[in-house]
Amino acid sequence: MLQNAWLIPLFPLLSFIVLTAFRRHTGRLAAVIGLAATGASLLMALMVFAEQWQGNSFKAEITWLEIGDKIITMGYEVNPLNALMLVIVTLVSFLVHLYSKGYMEGDSRISVFYAYLGLFTFAMLGLVLSPNLLQVYIFWELVGLGSFLLIGYYYFKPEAKAAAKKAFIMTRIGDVGLFIGIILLFWQTGSFEYDEIFKAVANQEISQTMITLTALLVFVGAIGKSGQLPLHTWLPDAMEGPTPVSALIHAATMVAAGVYLVASAFPLFEASQTALTTVAAVGGATAIFAASIGLMQKDIKRVLAYSTVSQLGYMMLALGSAGYTAGIFHLTTHAFFKALLFLAAGSVIHAVHTQNIEEMGGLWKKLRLTGPLFLIGALAISGFPLLSGFFSKDEILAAVYADGRYGLFVLALIAAFMTSFYMFRLFFMVFSGQPRSKQDGVHESGWTMTLPMIVLGVLAVVAGYVNTPWFGTFLNDYLAQGPVELAHEHHGPLWIPIAATTVSLLGILLAYLMYAKKSLSRDWLSRSFPSVSDIIYNKWFVDEAYEATFIKGTKAASCGGTLIDRYIVEGAAEGTVSAVQLLAKSGNKVQDGKVQTYGTVVILGLAVIFAVVALTGGYFS
Amino acid sequence: MDTDALLSYNWAIMAPEFTILGVATLLSVLDLFMGKNTSRRPLLWMALAGVAVAMAFVFAELDTDVTSILHDTYRLDFFSKAFKILLLLGGFLVLLLAADYRKKELQEYRGEFYYLFLTALLGAMIMASSADMITLFVGLELLSLSSYILAGIRKKSGKSNESAFKYVVSGGIATAITLFGMSYIFGLTGQTNLFDVVETLQEPVLLEHSFLLVFAFFMTFIGLSFKIAAAPFHMWAPDVYEGAPIPVTAFLSVVSKTAGFIILLRFILLTFIAAAGIDRDPLLVQVQPYVIVLAAATMILGNLGALRQRNIKRLFAYSSVAQAGYILVPFVSNSTQVFELIWFYLLAYIVMNIGAFACLQTLTRDAGSNDVSIFRGLFSRSPWLASAMTIFLLSLAGIPATAGFAGKFGIFMGALGPEPGHYVLAGIMMLMTLVSYVYYFNIIGLMFFRSGGTGGRRISIAPSIGAVLVFCAIATIGLGIMPNIALDFFFGQFDVNEFFMNTGHNH
């Protein structure tokens, strides 16, 4: 099976080609074709994963290009990390294909949509299977292209067009860094292969400075793709794409590619303390920064987008703190619960035709399936005990603590608090109380939309049990078979999960007090959370406390974050653009259409060269 | 030179040139005798057949050893064969474009177009095969003079006239500068044969005049850079490209540019390879910083210029200036890789740029406008055309899995490879590539994300254009995924020593 792993990306590619070629004739068949292709990929990925689980790895390559005496190869490999990624990508992609059948019903360009999805899935799977950095880069770009096309799918909306362009250009900035890093690595080690590079690093064939430099450059690429500070601004805008796309690309797979890249190149990062610290610091800062912005957003998808940025920051923080397993673990669980949240959000949008949470409310009774599923996702991401997010977040916190990064540890705890707060603010605003606007004909979505959510809902609950302090650390043992030396498993002190749980519950509680208490019937809540409601009984005390501190505090934090975002980050980006435009303008001024000018420019150019040659060549001395 | 000597030459090696010359002559005579209202279509098929036969001769000669006749004024080495393949391929594709060019407009001068086109091609081929300043110059002028007329071939169009006029004047300046530079070299060495020039330049007496040699280098380099539209000789390109008919624009930006690189490689590398500059350092090393500045300036001016263009032909003119800048980068590093890098990039450039021009021609004719908005909503009107154009644009932008990426990647590595690496130049190339995304992706955005355009009607694609599109698209993707196909061919035949090997000529 492992030898045939290269077939996995080809099914979606086939779907893309067929759907593009026969786009006028497929119509409703488009979904079936897409589903069949990703279904086949999913089956194969599962088989590959099963075989990989028994400890087999595989690698095959052919010569692609010879430059001088350097041979550049192309091929594919299966190792523990990418076998896991294969399953995540194919599974989420399959579910999103299914979901889209319902969500995109009636869209006249449905086959184009499925074609783009196929292209993206192909690129993402290709990226995952790549055994060398050059190939990674190639698919990295293709993934970006797929994302570009899908964000701009609603091309008649100017925002969507702008967002697509922004996403492409912003991530390109990161890609330049990545590319330079890859080239530097090539000239230092003579190879693009992960294996060769790791060998060279282990044998200290590269200077320490170079290791740090290249690791940081690779990380710049990851920053762009994974929406880390300061290149994160494209991700919230990317929500202009159809919601299933947001679930697939901007939550579960592509944005996780940055984290995946750092994980695949982990031995390189491990060799440089500076690089690890940078990764951890950027991750930690992003986690809290994005979470603070998430507190104030009014668009349901934007809240989820900032939440994604924040959670990706968490994963980076884990990797930077040498918590390899923790990072991958959170990547896995996050893929499930964030995809679930997006699909549920899509179901809500589908029902009420708005994305503004101010106009929602009271949907719990109307969306009998979506509501509980959203709740599961919200609980999982908040780190509610015994759900998947609880275990993976605990793992991250333990890793950060074990690594001695106490400052970042505190940041991560605060971010965890904010996460549960904004998630439940969202939940209560959408599902509890009375409708805040006229809602006509709200009904639950069809089975094609609910089934994927149910599958993800189950996974969001149970995925955490692959790596727990109690049942066994399967994931860690499994990943330990890979190229990364896993020194130890972090099982921090017991107070860490307790602290994490406490802040998570506090966040939920606060959200409840602020957004639900006035309008929600008390007995519904006491039935669901009997213990919580007892504490809430003392509301006046908490009320006054948060009036004085939290509301002002969070408002200030959020405003600060938004301000930095709007004026400094965007300002810098726009400044660069206008500088380039200005240069272009002045360059075109000389181009006045007069052939005399053109001749003069040539003669002047020649004269300048002669003058410089004469002066520097010592002709006059 | 007596008759025996003339007869003793292996004239067979000139078969490709003779073919083109013969067809061109035949066409000009036929054109005279054809009635005024007779269709000139048969001339096109004959021209195409001529180019195909010439191509076949080049391939048949592949195994021939290095040969030279006429005192090295005509050489057959792998350099000439490899680059003639590019010229003939480009010429063939451009002729196919011309087959569809607004039939009515070209009616009255169809005949001229074909044989002037062939003489231009002949000039370029002579340049590829010559190692003597006189024949190199004759080839250059044959190409130039034919192109001047081609640019103005739409006699009744003001734009076309303006284009031809500007081209003549700029070309005249370029020729003057080139000749002036060459006269320095002749003055210093008393030779016109490049191999003799190389030998004579080693004489100690000449080392004292190295200053003049450096000047000669810059004059010839800048004079010759006119053909490739590199800075500071790039400004004519937008104006000339804009006014000329699209097949001619395609010819200027692809075939003529290839010819420019051929003469640059042949003349500059051969003449100055062993020359000493000021203070007896190798001249080519000494001039490196200047070439870097020129290459960087070309990339910057081309890309920034393209940013603000709305006229699609001007946009492609600037884009082709930028592309010339990329191809200049291998010149900077004096490695033997320069041949393979430039050859491969030119091959990629031929297929992607002619492909793009095929799309342009169809669209501008359909819309009757050169504004960039003609791309609006193309994907919904004509998905195949839009997909093909996307492939070409991605390749021009250098996105992976296209020929443009493979070529750019090689150039990039070549710039960083030899010690010391040219990090600044590679950085500028990277940065400018990034800038180029803006205007290339703007077009892609228009095609996919905009609706409207010309009333949503479908666009018909002429069969000859369709053939060009299919060929170029397949080649662009094929060379991107398997660049080895072309490179294996190149390496299988190419021996860098051949280029510098002085054969069969008597002193």
Image (spheres, coloured by chain):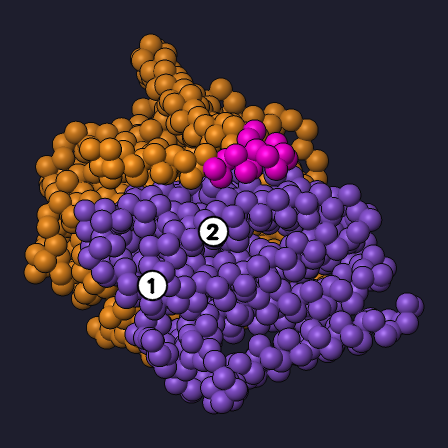
Chain colours: A orange, B purple
Q: Is residue A575 visible?
A: yes
Give the structural element (helix, strand or loop) at label 1. helix
Q: Is residue A63 visible?
A: no
Q: Earlier in the sequence, mark 1 or mark 2?
A: 2
Residue A531 position, x and y percent, is 32, 32
Q: Decide which of B494, B424 is in the foreground and name it.
A: B494
Residue B371 position, x and y percent, is 70, 42
Real-space CA distance between mark 1 and mark 2, rounded to the nearest whole angstrom: 16 Å
Give the structural element (helix, strand or loop) at label 2. helix
Q: List the residue tagged with mark 2.
A: B178
> Which chain is indicated by disc 2?
B
**Looking at the picture, which amino acid does disc 1 mark?**
Val
Q: Residue at x 24, y 70 (%)?
A: A69
Asked if residue A593 is positioned above or below residue A12 in the image, the reply reads: above
> Are the residues under marks 1 and 2 on the same chain?
yes
Q: Which residues are magenta?
A: A588-603
Q: List the residue tagged with mark 1.
A: B197
